[in-house]
Amino acid sequence: MQSDVRKKLLDAFTDSKDEFLSGQYLADLIGCSRTAVWKHIEELRKEGFELEAVRRKGYRIVKTPQNVSADEIRLGLKTEFIGQNIHYEETVISTQKIAHRLSMENAPEGTLVIADEQLNGKGRLGRSWHSPKYTGVWMSIILRPNIPIGKAPQLTLLTAVAVVQAIQEETELEPQIKWPNDILLNGKKVTGILTELHAEADKIHSVIIGIGINVNQQQEDFPEELHPVATSLSIASGGKKINRAALIRAVLTRMEKLYLLYLEKGFEPIRLLWESYALSIGKMITARTLTGSIYGKALGITEDGVLRLEDQNGKIHHVYSADIELD
């Protein structure tokens, strides 16, 4: 009930477009007393929201906090289900671990798990992901698609497109996708995506998609060994600070739009979008797989999201998992 009232309050401020809302209007809209409205206003202030209160005019939000609390994300979020249920913690071992638990507890589709700090974030192939406090976006999303298990990797590619579009929307940057799930700026990694399944027999129970975005880190925030390979949106923007909550809302909005398109039209529209953002398509690359390396021209991806690679003898290889190096 408490969260419902808070959500209605934030939705009202979102729709107000910076106009003042009276305490009586908010009380009538939400269905509570003016005293209850005042208490929720005070709670928002404690979270770091700056609210202007003018007698006979009411309240309006003039400044939002820089953390990524559930309330800050909800302010301005217009999705139907992705991100409408938010589990926020300041510091976690891993958002993926929490999302797995919530998934097994039947959390609704679109549930977002987000933290300001991740102590043991993981990337693909079990690699660690550096997730310092208050600098990036560390989050996991629970989806429950009615699709065959073999098509689940398509959601990784869908997520990459959503993140690229969100970064373009919130910055002046033009990120590119490195197959299968890395997003690069100026040749350095800015985002990683990790997709994990809960499934039984031939049915998907849930897909947990982890997203890590380096947002406001500066060079000194990265361990020295990551300097040649990692960057942040802020570094790529010349030191400009990026609003993390706005970026999260953009990712959730883009993701829901693409996900609904995918469920209706299949993977083909997503595949075309993915290839339009791909760094390696048409280029000579080396794919380092568990069984050896393949050198050739990246032709694109299949309906199943598998990389098609043409070697120097004209043979087409289908690469399911590999580390990619550009020539």
Image (cartoon, helix red, strand yellow):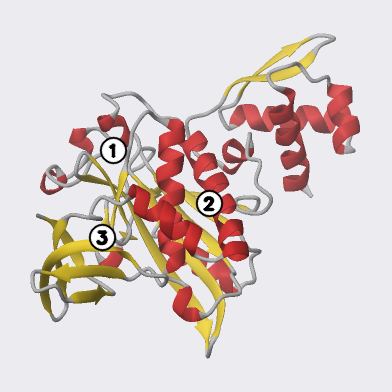
Q: Quadrant of the C terminus?
A: bottom left
Q: Which mark is residue 128?
A: 3
Q: Alpha-carbon distance for marks 1 and 3? A: 17 Å
Residue 56 picture location, percent across and down: 85, 9
Left-right relation of 89 to 110: left
Q: Residue at x 56, y 75 (%)?
A: 147
Q: Amino acid at mark 2?
A: Met
CA gap, disc 1 and disc 2? 21 Å
Residue 121 percent across, percent down from the top left: 33, 58
Which of the 4 image quadrants contains residue 129? bottom left
Q: Secondary structure at mark 1?
A: loop
Q: CA distance from mark 2 to mark 3?
A: 25 Å
**Front of the two marks 2 and 3:** 2
Assess disc 1: are there few (<14), some (14-19) or many (≥20) residues with their C-alpha within 10 Å of its C-alpha. many
Q: Judge left or right: residue 293 versus residue 94.
A: left
**In this figure, which residue is indicated by the disc labeled 2?**
255
Q: Which mark is residue 232?
A: 1
Q: Residue 37 is drawn in which quadrant? A: top right
Tell me what residue is drawn at x 44 percent, y 42 percent: 165
Tell which residue pokes out farthest to the top in this image.
55
Kindly tell me whether residue 118 is visible in this rendering.
no
Extreme residue in the bottom direction: 201
The residue lying furthest to the front in this view is 314
Tell whether label 2 touches label 1 (CB within 8 Å): no
Q: Position of residue 259 (x, y in %)?
A: 56, 58
**Residue 53 seen in the current view:** yes
Residue 219 lies, with reference to residue 19, above or below; the image says below
- Give the SS element for disc 2: helix
Indicate which disc, 1 or 2, sits on the residue closer to the N terminus. Answer: 1
Quarter holding residue 261:
bottom right
Q: Is 254 left, or right, of 44 in this rendering?
A: left
